[in-house]
Amino acid sequence: MSLKLYNSLTSKKEIFKSISGKKVKTYGCGPTVYNSPHLGNFRTFVFYDLLNRVLKMNGYKTETAVNITDIDDKIIDKVNEQKTTLKEVTSKYELSFMELSSSLKILPNNYNPRATDYVNQMIEFIQTLIDNDLAYEMDGNIFFSIEKYPHYGKFVKINDDLEIEDIDLSKKNRSDFTLWKARKEKDGEIFWKSQWGEGRPGWHTECAVMIKTLFNGQLDIHCGGIDLKFPHHENESAQIEAIQKHNLSNYWLHAEHLNVDNEKMSKSLGNFVDVKKLIKENGSNIVRLFLLSAHYRTKVSFNQKKIDDCKKMINKINRFASNIIKSDEKINLKFSEDHNKFIDALNDDLNTPEALGVFFSFVTKMNKKIAENSFNDSDNIKSFIFLKLFNSIFDIIDLDNLQENEIPKEVQDLLVSRQEARDNKDWKLSDNLRDKLSEMGWIVEDSVDGQNLLKKK
Ligand code: AMP
Ligand code: ZN
């Protein structure tokens, strides 16, 4: 099944088509570094990682960016509260984001751009918007004029009930959003010089300009938590699409929230779970499995019972894995039906609960065979391939600890050559290789699932 993703632009699952062959460019809105990211933030960050891994599973070469928001009101409040510098606060929490990401096995991104490193480009970009009559200045603030951009409202219907930012500032239209904020007293030393006076860029401009600079303003997929759809993604895309001929992104994916007692887990509500502590108490594999166990578009409530259930699931996988002997998966080049069902579930808009279900029913089937003593080499190879495939996405088991293969390297190499001969329909060579293996004490049988190897008794 080809990869399908739910696109927030059309509110439909669509077959994924990349802009340029097997290359895919993705951007996810990253952490605001005034605090350590909580478990809710990591639900979204692990979802970015899931998307990256599923794209790779489909043979795409990904180029990914997750930004670091290191200019923001909340950061300035923290700097003032702690009487310290911007860098002191942001570098501490950026490090914490990086360490926790690696502990949760999030694959490194190609870029983790910091907003502070792109301020010159942001000033240039805002000037271009002014020159094109899309933005205007008022009291040293620069606003994007939504009236001037007829496509404003791609994610929402524009009406008076919408969330309005910076209502205390004078602007032409209450929905106009801020591109540049004039320096205020509380900003202290946190400001940049521009042709409009001292100030700093607005959040929506930060992401827009980082995407413009890194990806020439064109992405295959843009992701974020659902709370970012409006106004952040609306505003991010409006300002950039107003001056370029193409879309900012063809697909927009949004992850639902992690809740606590039906309320969004958030720093400001104070109901957040500390990821470091949770990992320390349970191990990172259990936390990662918990974050992946629900579909990314469903709301999930955090509770200890779910963590305990994940612990049981991991124990079951590890018990199963302890029966599996490492094998050269090249021996069996074909994926079995079970493997394909797992892939299909993930390709159906990253359906992790369904993929887990497929994997666990396979584990149960194989455990039964192990208990009945009917687990053969072919089952072992299938199980090994499945464990590797499973781990390429979920990454929660230590495959290095599997039992080592007893099949000599020479025999494995002959099997690989024989598979190649069979793929080339060179039956003579295939038969010769079978005879050679037989002389060495190994019986090969061919089945729909590939070659089965048995040691002569
Ligand atoms: P922030 O650090 O607040 O800028 O958020 C970083 C990312 O985490 C954004 O994509 C948010 O949408 C996402 N996020 C924040 N809270 C939650 C939550 N409770 N559940 C899932 N994602 C969240
Ligand atoms: Zn963003």
Image (spheres, helix red, strand yellow):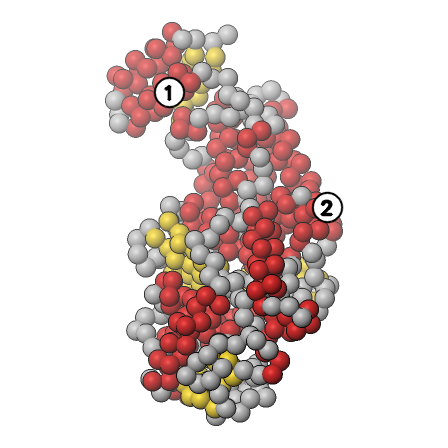
In the picture, the disc for residue 201 is none
Q: Residue at x 34, y 85 (%)?
A: 131
Q: Residue at x 58, y 29 (%)?
A: 401
Q: Position of residue 321 (x, y in %)?
A: 59, 30
Q: Quadrant of residue 163?
A: bottom right
Would the CB of label 2 be found within 8 Å of ligand 1? Answer: no
Q: Earlier in the sequence, mark 2 or mark 1?
A: 2
Residue 133 sits above or below residue 20 on the image? below
The residue type indicated by label 1 comes to Asp
Q: Secondary structure at mark 1?
A: helix
Q: Position of residue 431 (x, y in %)?
A: 31, 15
Residue 145 is at least partly visible in this image: no
Pointer 2 residue: 281
Depth check, front residue: 11 or 44: 44
The residue type indicated by label 2 comes to Glu
Q: Residue at x 44, y 26 (%)?
A: 328
Q: Residue at x 48, y 91 (%)?
A: 138
User: Pointers 2 and 1 in contact (CB under 8 A)?
Assistant: no
Depth check, front residue: 166 or 98: 98
Pointer 1 residue: 413
Q: Position of residue 419 (x, y in %)?
A: 34, 24
Residue 290 sits above or below residue 432 on the image? below
Q: Secondary structure at mark 2?
A: helix
Depth check, front residue: 2 or 273: 273
Q: Quadrant of residue 359?
A: top right
Tag nearer the camera, 2 or 1: 2
Would the CB of label 1 be found within 8 Å of ligand 1? Answer: no
Q: Position of residue 338 (x, y in %)?
A: 49, 37
Residue 168 sits above or below residue 64 on the image? below
Give the side of residue 402 with respect to residue 279, left or right: left
